[in-house]
Amino acid sequence: MEKATENGPNGAHSGRVGPTNPMVTPLLTDQYQFTMFYAYWKAGKHNERAVFDLYFRRNPFGGEYTIFAGLEECIRFISTFKFTEEEIAFVRESLPPSCEDGFFDYLREIDCSDVEVYAVSEGSVVFPKVPLLRVEGPVAVVQLLETPFLNLINYASLVATNAARHRFVAGKSKILLEFGLRRAQGPDGGIGASKYCYLGGFDATSNVAAGKLFGIPLRGTHSHAFVSSFMSPDEIIDKSLHSSDGSSICEDFVSLVQKWLSKIQWSGSSHGSFGETNQSELAAFTSYALAFPNNFLALVDTYDVIRSGIPNFCAVALALSDLGYKATGIRLDSGDLAYLSCEARKFFVAIENDFGVPGFGKTAITASNDLNEETLDALNKQGHEVDAFGIGTHLVTCFAQPALGCVFKLVEINDQPRIKLSEDVSKVSIPCKKRCFRLYGKEGYPLVDIMTGENEPSPQVGERILCRHPFNESKRAYVVPQRVEELLKCYWPGTSDKAKEDLPPLKDIRKRCMEQLEQMRPDHMRRLNPTPYKQVSVSAKLYDFIHFLWLNEAPVGELQ
């Protein structure tokens, strides 16, 4: 994938790669961002240096972890951030006529060259309250980034987490296919789902546009419509098929298929499970095999899986085998998937034994049909023979939880820490510019994420560290880390001379995600009742400062 280049001081945008979606422009924001922007400008505060944290408050889907995604699109967005004359004209129309002309002249000048973005690496396992992004820069400009950043990260992280949860339930050995485009929330939802499901552990997608944009492997064969469009084998005009090595040609592949179907009927493989199969289905399978002899996978539930679909598939697969090809497998899209997959496997093993076709018993079985975490878990408990799962609606729509709920909060301005208070303690922000660290234990599992003030010493391996809950004074623990990882890295330095992290390709982000999940303790990963991770901790010094600022900012009541 292409990388956004560093934003230079000249404000020129040549050579930079913008967001994947062309609708992501400076206007993709909420109206109050512009009203605040004007008020900042009017008050002469627009260039004051501010620090914002982007984070979420609760893990989704009742779990204890989240996958961070969407960072690359944020960096692409700010790399080309610039208002066009047409956009400025629209902003002028949307604001009250009393707004001064000088403000719109200022809009023409701004870009993100004076913004700095520090972030957790995309594909990382992350936890509530710990900043995913720290954004520094002129307060008015950074405020404009709030809504697009939240938009680009909320869904991306939610669907990547959903994908990771499905992967965990399915198991490492199963192939997971994202089939959600037709059920996704519009084109952008479909494209984003394909990208971030792949990041979260899926192996391929049916979405051709996503395959082109992101290099995701594509998978797909045919639908019930293709099967039911055939009436009989007589419709097949060109019946010839070359052998896989090109050394010979079968002039009548249709007849070869029919011969194999008769052999199967009279062999012990069928155990009397079928008589006459549906000939229109057989015609469809044969036609598809002629078109794709190296990639023949048949949807076998259009009429009857046991009595027609599987025998017809086996006849075509054995005919292909005669010519040196190996059929890919079958797909089940309805019915009792556990039972049908087990019956199909028995049939394939019997074919291998009866006709001496090596490996036929391991023919791949794919299942689809409105699958979700619960159905995957149920299949595992029932026992099944499915090798691959095609998952759509529940995956891409995040049916179990529609939003992650990331927020973007001011934590410092002009080097002065700021705090947002609330009667709901979970909504109290953690003030000041912070550094974030992950502390690992002896077994290699992460123990706790801790935030410190920017100028505090870094936690050290082997050093006893007091980790405190930011708001509950009784929740505290000492940790002696065996490894310390700093989480926030500079991905956009603006005009500063700070070292900049490269944006890795999607396949490397996916690999990072899989490695991060491997590092998690299994009880944190459970689908039901997972053990809570000691998610949000602060250093003793930061704890004291939070409560000092809290008392300083909270008004004192008076009783009469």
Image (cartoon, helix red, strand yellow):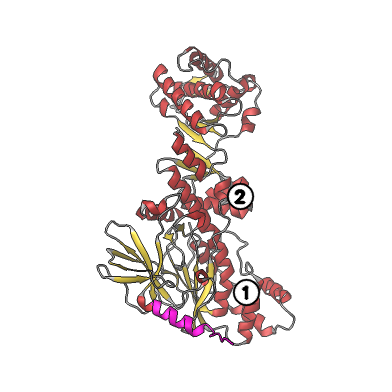
Q: Find out whether residue 559 is within the magenta segment.
A: yes
State whether residue 218 appears in this view. no
In this rendering, is residue 180 above or below 441? above
Count of numbered circles on the image:
2
The residue lying furthest to the right in this view is 97
Q: What element carries label 2?
A: loop
Compared to residue 276, the image places residue 89 above or below, namely below
Is 374 placed above or below 557 here? Answer: above
- Which residue in the rendered view is the most extreme toward the top? 266
Q: Is 236 in front, or is 408?
A: 408
Q: Which residue is under mark 2?
A: 184
Looking at the image, tell me whether mark 2 or mark 1 is earlier in sequence order. 1
Amino acid at the residue labelled 1 = Gln
- Residue 560 location (% of width, % of height): 59, 87
Determine whether the residue tagged by mark 1 lies in a helix, strand or loop: helix
Q: Is residue 558 above or below residue 485?
A: below
Q: From the viewer's perspective, is 73 left or right of 536?
A: right
Q: Which residue is drawn at 47% across and 83% down?
A: 551
Q: Which amino acid does label 2 sit on?
A: Ala
**On the image, which quarter does residue 423 sit in?**
bottom right
The image position of residue 509, as x and y in percent, is 43, 56
| Residue 182 visible at all | yes
Q: Is the magenta stretch mostly helix, strand or loop?
A: helix
Q: Mark 1 points at which residue?
A: 33
**Disc 2 to disc 1, C-alpha distance:** 29 Å
- Point out residue 223 in the picture as x, y percentages from the top left corner: 60, 34
Answer with left or right where residue 249 lies relative to residue 435: right
Segment colored magenta: 542-560
Q: Dividing the picture into quarters, in which one does residue 469 lie? A: bottom left
Q: Which residue is drawn at 69% across and 85% down?
A: 100
- Picture quadrant of residue 282: top right
